[in-house]
Amino acid sequence: MPWVKEELCVGCGVCIDECPVEAIAMVDETARINDQECIRCGRCHDVCPEEAVRHDSEKIPEEIDANLEWTRRLLQHFDTSEEKRGLVERMKRYFAKEKKVAQQTIERLESLSEEL
Ligand code: SF4
Ligand code: SF4
């Protein structure tokens, strides 16, 4: 999913003109991509003169931090170390499930790609 790094965007609007599904809007002179509308064609990334449209992979550290922050917030609802460790184990199982979903989705997409 492409995203706009705000500090690099100069608000030129080139990406908005190129987007085939009008998924980009200008908000406070910065391009903003609507995730629900975007069809992941990559044109905005290719045309941006400032390299402000970035790849998903750059958000990995940020998303990991958000997951840890989520877990820390949940931990506040538990009192004992045993309860807290129980929560951490459940979170680990949750993310293990997410990993399995991602792995199996990739396998299915590889099969889909071979059919095209
Ligand atoms: S093309 Fe790049 S710099 Fe121009 S508005 Fe879009 S994201 Fe911002
Ligand atoms: S990837 Fe394509 S559809 Fe998505 S915002 Fe960029 S130009 Fe629009």
Image (cartoon, helix red, strand yellow):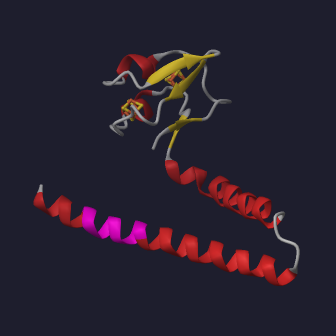
- Residue 77 magenta: no
* Mark count: 0
Horizontal relation, residue 77 to residue 55: left or right: right
Of residues 82 and 101, the one drawn nearer to the viewer in this rendering: 82
Where is residue 110 drawn, in percent x and y?
A: 24, 65
Horizontal relation, residue 31 to residue 107: left or right: right
Of residues 111 and 17, the one drawn nearer to the viewer in this rendering: 111
Q: Quadrant of residue 38?
A: top left
Q: Residue at x 34, y 71 (%)?
A: 104
Q: Is residue 94 above or below residue 10?
A: below
Point out the stretch of residues depicted in magenta: 101-109
Horizontal relation, residue 66 to residue 25: left or right: right
Q: Quadrant of residue 5?
A: top right
Q: Residue at x 31, y 24 (%)?
A: 20
Q: Quadrant of residue 112?
A: bottom left
- Residue 107 magenta: yes
Q: Residue at x 54, y 26 (%)?
A: 32
**Please, which residue is most extreme toward the left here?**
115
Q: Quadrant of ligand 2?
A: top left
Which is the main secondary structure of the residues drawn in magenta?
Answer: helix
